[in-house]
Image (tube, grey):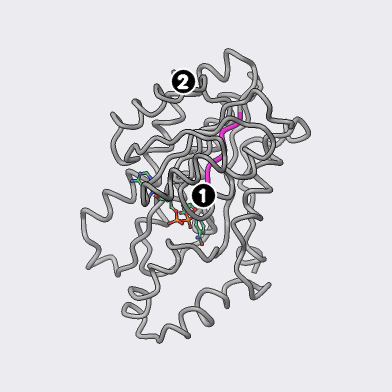
Amino acid sequence: MILEGKVALVTGSTSGIGLAIARSLAAKGAKVMLNGFGDPAEIEKLKSELGALHDGADMSDPAQIEAMVRHCSDELGAPDIVVNNAGIQHVSPVEEFPVEKWNAILAINLSAVFHTTRLTIASMKAKGWGRIINTASAHSLIASPNKSAYVAAKHGVAGFTKTVALEAAKDGVTVNCISPGYVWTPLVENQIPDTMKARNLTREQVVNDVLLAAQPTKRFVTPEEIGALALFLCREEARSITGANLSVDGGWTAA
Ligand code: NAD
């Protein structure tokens, strides 16, 4: 139980990668604050499975983020581990990209990372221990067509991560991002129809020739593989890993 006594705030943890990260941290004793949307009955089940609390803050709203951090501090304690994971996607050529989608992607995928960090890092520094783990993406390193907002936001997360890592390095707080390749989650499944339209492809072509073809391993990364790396970053053995952008992408960005 290496995380006994630690409080972990994991955004976007009602589904996919965030849920796998929350499970891996809770399994090692962390007290977890879940966040994200979903069926209330399903969220209740997750809370009892993980012995966790949940806050439904919309990560596009700084006031709700602030209230969530207060909720976590009041009920569980100030977060020792923050996993900035909530994210959305929209696929469309730039000339047709809806302005409201651009604003939402930048707010949720990038600005929210700034807000949770600015609201939690001071208490981590004061304790001399903390972990900030940002779910970036292979798209923090490379681009794909029709994902301008997502690629811009994820490149921003990578730069933000490096900067804050430098600011916190001497205080026992590490700041890293994990950059997954394609993981079969609702975020990926939901972008298939728009990718079919934007690139004039069938569903099978998108899955095989766009998604799986990007990864030399020819398989999807699993959420549990990301959860295992997030847990490793919380271990004492990982204290020298900071400012890193760790790819878990089946060789995609190496290729
Ligand atoms: P997902 O759709 O399964 O999960 C997204 C989570 O974010 C859900 O819990 C959802 O409720 C939450 N969320 C969405 N909008 C929110 C908002 N406004 N406020 C609060 N919560 C919100 O997707 P996923 O694939 O698990 O994505 C998680 C993260 O991983 C994202 O940052 C995504 O960009 C990143 N990522 C995913 C992949 C992939 O292939 N699936 C690859 C690289 C990076």
Q: Give the distance between the C-alpha atoms of the residues marked 1 and 2, in whole angstroms.
A: 25 Å
| Residue 30 visible, this angle | yes
Q: Nearer the viewer, residue 251 or 186?
A: 186
Q: Quadrant of residue 195?
A: bottom left
Which residue is depicted at the point 64% across and 49% down? 246
Q: Ligand 1: does it lie within 8 Å of the C-beta at label 1?
A: yes
> With 67 as the anchor, is 45 left or right in this view?
right
**Quarter occupied by the C terminus:** bottom right
Which residue is depicted at the point 53% across and 30% down? 164
Provide the secondary structure element on which disc 2 rests: helix
Image position, residue 203 (x, y; %): 42, 83
> With 122 as the anchor, is 173 left or right in this view?
right
Provide the secondary structure element on which disc 1 rests: loop
Per the rendered image, the range of residues in magenta is 131-136
Image position, residue 133 (x, y; %): 57, 39
Which of discs 1 and 2 lies nearer the camera? The answer is: 2
Image position, residue 84 (x, y; %): 48, 40
Which residue is depicted at the point 57% across and 40% down? 50
Q: Quadrant of residue 144?
A: bottom left
Label disc, if present, on residue 136 of the rendered structure? 1
The answer to whether residue 89 is magenta is: no
The type of residue carrying mark 1 is Ala
Position of residue 129 relative to residue 178, above or below, is: above
Q: Marks 2 and 1: in contact by CB < 8 Å?
A: no
**Mark nearer the N terminus (1 vs 2):** 2
Work out which residue is located at the far right of the displayed protein and give it: 237
Label disc, if present, on residue 73 of the rendered structure? 2
Which residue is depicted at the point 38% across and 54% down? 88
The type of residue carrying mark 2 is Ser
Position of residue 55 relative to residue 221, above or below, is: above
**Quarter occupied by the N terminus:** top right
